[in-house]
């Protein structure tokens, strides 16, 4: 798996296949992504994320009008980062019978509509939904690392205060 070329970004590490980014400062790691989408129906996404520095993990599911909205909603439920995608770019590189996708995403954080916009990028991935989830999670990690949010678990346990 190729590392992000922009070293200013915190990678959203991927653990499912044993691949992890080299940056030890990544806040959340994607451990599981399951997406169900059917024409004319709400999509559902389940994510399991891990916060490696404090050895905590959380899993949640959410629905959305489409699979990408469901993924964003599920990640937001776990991280409580309140992000909203406001732009996305996808590039595909063909390798044999399949493609490898790279996703860049702009995410606005803050509920007042005038929040901070953060760019997220994911590593190349043959699964488009996973590439999208990793890019979105990268934006969440960058947002948290910039000291723009205090993240708390639903039960009040402090995960990070930056």
Image (cartoon, rainbow, N blue to C red):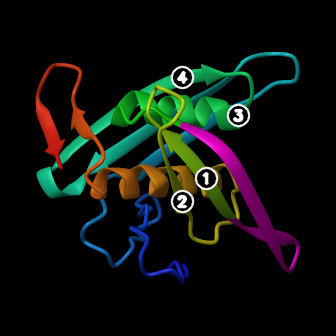
Residue furthest out toward the top: 41
Q: Given contact means CB atoms under 8 Å apart, are the residues at marks 2 and 1 in contact?
A: yes
**Is residue 110 shown above or below 32?**
above
- Nearer to us in this view, 146 or 71: 146
> Disc 2 vs disc 4: which is toward the camera?
2
Q: Main secondary structure of the magenta part?
A: strand
> Disc 4 vs disc 1: which is toward the camera?
1
Residue furthest out toward the front: 114
Q: Which residues are magenta?
A: 84-102
Q: Residues within 10 Å of mark 3 (few under 14, many from 20)?
A: some
State the residue position of label 2.
Answer: 120
Q: Element under label 1?
A: strand
State the residue position of label 3.
Answer: 67
Residue 22 percent across, percent down from the top left: 34, 79
Whole-angstrom CA distance, mark 2 to mark 4, is 21 Å
**Is residue 126 shown above or below 93?**
above
Whole-angstrom CA distance, mark 3 to mark 2, is 18 Å
State the residue position of label 1.
Answer: 106
Which quarter of the figure has residue 58? Answer: top left
State the residue position of label 4.
Answer: 62
């Amino acid at each position: 798996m190729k590392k992000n070329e922009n070293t200013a970004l915190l990678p959203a590490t991927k653990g499912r296949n044993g691949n992890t980014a080299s940056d030890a400062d990544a806040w959340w790691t994607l451990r599981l992504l399951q997406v169900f989408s059917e024409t004319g129906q709400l999509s559902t996404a389940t994510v399991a994320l891990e916060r490696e520095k404090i050895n905590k993990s959380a899993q949640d599911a959410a629905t959305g009008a489409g699979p990408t909205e469901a993924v964003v909603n599920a990640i937001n439920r776990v991280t409580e980062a309140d992000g909203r995608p406001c732009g996305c770019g996808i590039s595909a590189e063909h390798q044999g019978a399949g493609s490898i996708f790279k996703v860049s995403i702009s995410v606005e954080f803050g509920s007042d509509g005038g929040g901070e916009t953060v760019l997220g990028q994911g590593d190349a991935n043959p699964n488009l939904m996973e590439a999208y989830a990793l890019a979105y999670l990268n934006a969440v990690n960058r947002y948290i690392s910039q000291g723009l949010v205090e993240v708390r678990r639903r039960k009040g346990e402090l995960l990070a205060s930056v």
